[in-house]
Image (cartoon, grey):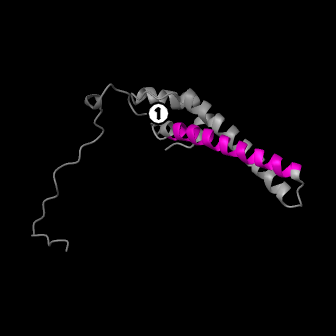
Amino acid sequence: MLDIKFIRENIELVKQTCINRHMEIDVDLLLKLDDDRRTLLKKVEDLRALRNQKSKGKPSAEEIERMRGVGDEIKQIEIELEKVTTDYNDLIYKVPNTTHVDTPVGKDETENIVIRKVGAPKKFDFQPREHW
């Protein structure tokens, strides 16, 4: 699996790899989901930090109500984050590894180029022992 940072930095390479491997993956959608996921994570973390900061002192009744609202907002964002993360994971796990630049591109395995062949097993002039 490719790291999302690598995908962000090498968008065209990843798109070309998908084409070369005959895989239909929407890399732009993956990057949008990644951006959405990171934005939602930041919102949740900021709200949790606010809630933790306010819980250290003696809160007033008004602050308690506000923090309940923050808790509800955190729950809503976490639900949305779970949906985005599921879609994100479905896509990122399908992204293929990049191929070497010398690898020929063909429509199927019949167009593979044979680089070398390994011959028949070595003939011994004695009876080899079993490995066990």
How many C-alpha atoms fall within 10 Å of the one at disc 1: few (<14), some, or many (≥20)? few
Residue found farthest to the front: 61
- Magenta range: 62-89
Decide if residue 6 is on the left or right side of residue 45.
Answer: left
Q: Position of residue 50 (x, y in %)?
A: 81, 50
At 16% from the left and 51% from the top, the residue drawn is 120
Query: How many marks can you see?
Result: 1
Position of residue 50 relative to residue 87, above or below, is below
Question: In the rendered view, does 39 fall on the left or right side of 98?
Answer: right
Q: Quadrant of the C terminus?
A: bottom left
Which amino acid type is marked by label 1?
Val
Asked if residue 63 is among those painted magenta in the image, a careful observer would answer yes
Q: Which residue is mark 1?
A: 101
Q: Residue at x 47, y 29 (%)?
A: 25
Q: Nearer the viewer, residue 130 or 80?
A: 80
Q: Measured along the vertical axis of the image, is residue 43 above or below residue 120?
A: above
Position of residue 91 in the picture relative to residue 52 (left or right): left
**For the residue labelled by badge 1, is the local secondary structure a helix, a strand or a loop?**
loop
Which quadrant holds residue 21?
top left
Residue 73 in percent (x, y) is at 72, 42
Q: Is residue 131 visible?
A: yes
Left or right of 58 in this view: 20: left
Within the image, what quadrant is residue 72 found in? Answer: top right
Q: Nearer the viewer, residue 67 or 131?
A: 67
Query: How far from the left and from the top, in percent, is residue 56?
Result: 85, 61
* Residue 8: x %, y % from top left: 62, 35
Residue under the image location 13 percent in, 59 percent down: 123
The structure residue drawn at horizontal position 57% and vertical position 27%, both measured from the top left corner, is 28
Can residue 5 be seen in this snapshot?
Answer: no
Towards the viewer: 103 or 31: 31
Predominant secondary structure in magenta? helix
Q: Residue 8 colored magenta?
A: no
